Amino acid sequence: MTTTVLDSVSNSGQSGPAAATRKVLLLKPRGFCAGVVRAIDIVKIALDTFGAPIYVRREIVHNRYVVNELAEKGAIFVHEIDDVPDGQRVIYSAHGVSPAVRERSKGRNLKVIDATCPLVTKVHIEAVKFAKQGYSLVLIGHRDHDEIEGTLGEAPDVTQVVSSAAEVETLEVPDPDRVAYLTQTTLSLDEARDIITALKKKFPNIVGPHSQDICYATENRQVAVRNVAHNAELVLVVGSTNSSNSNRLVEVSRNLGTKGYLIDNSAAIDPKWLEGISTVAVTAGASAPEILVEDVVNYLNQNGFSSVEEVEVMPENVRFGLPPEIVQAIGGADGAEPVSVN
């Protein structure tokens, strides 16, 4: 773990020892993950290549700032495929879609660009594989999340969703020796561990994926909070309320006994939170842009937190390639149409 002092300025409104020790610990890694960068780039490239309007099913990523910015550029966000006019171009969000959505798109002759995160696609593939092998599936996650909706659609007849260890007790399956589990990619590591432990107790022969489904970015940001929370009296997580991984960061902090709050931007900070606080840790969920983090750090600086230290817990250099329909569009001669993927 490395610490770098990014900025240190005097604050004329503060004096004495307290002023000298008030600081911000800026966690790294934070903010955009590779899947989010990819999804946002897909929308921007589609707009630049084909022009507006470009329809997007659901929020491309769970952050209002990002969604509003793309909407200003010409993206039209819709709740369902049925809201897209026949024959138009539509982008699937990073959270993925069910086979039923793909079939409806095909029936409407929509030009599809798939921005599903590759790590979410991995979970979909695992669901299909286990279902074909005759397993009952337990999908660990939050029922109202877009990602769970899409994964559940891969094998709905054999899949049950559980959101807590307590729910495991009520599970009933045709064959207790043929059960498999998968997880939402944005869960709390502790939350998933407790549920998996309960599943293994109830179904001793249960099997899971070869590698964990919780994505690298979700894990890294949680580990960063876990490593730094004991050095701060307050953790501020930049992210929208519907961002699962952002909410999990707050939970990690609170579970460690450090106050934590989820904020969209600096305007959401209650000045009372800062009373008597000498050190604030700042991080951001995987769908929160760096501009919002900078906004929060500037606010804290203006309110007496004159030292900013970037604390890097581990390096993060993951990149994902663009989908073929975007690559073909960029490289195609004379504005060639991308191949529709349904």
Image (cartoon, grey):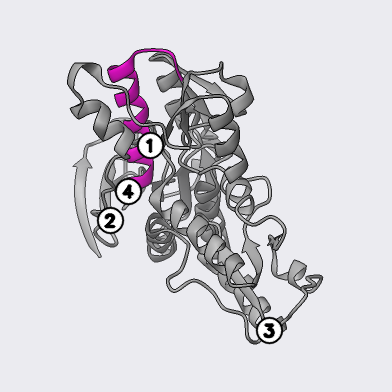
Residue 191 in view, yes or no: no
Query: Is 286 rendered above or below residue 173?
Result: above
| Residue 311 tag number | 2
Mark 2–mark 4 contact, CB under 8 Å?
A: yes
Q: Are marks 2 and 1 in contact (CB under 8 Å)?
A: no
Residue nearest the viewer, comparing 302 with 112: 112
Report the span colored magenta.
Answer: 34-54
Work out how far the residue at label 4 is from the one at label 3, CA to CA, in angstroms.
Answer: 47 Å
Say which residue appears at 57% left-offset and 68% top-offset: 130
Disc number lying in front (2 or 3): 3
Between 32 and 235, the one nearer to me in the picture: 32
Q: Name the side, left or right, on which 312 lies relative to 342.
A: left
Front disc: 4 or 3:
3
- Is label 2 in contact with label 3 (beta carbons under 8 Å)? no
Considering the numbered disc 2 on the image, is that residue within a helix, a strand or a loop?
strand
Residue matched to label 4: 26
Amino acid carrying label 2: it is Val
| Quadrant housing residue 288 | top left
Q: Quadrant of the N terminus?
A: bottom left
Residue 19 position in % (x across, y down): 33, 44
Please say whether residue 223 is visible from this viewpoint: yes
Question: Quick one: SS at disc 4?
Answer: strand
Disc 1 target residue? 39
For residue 38: magenta?
Answer: yes
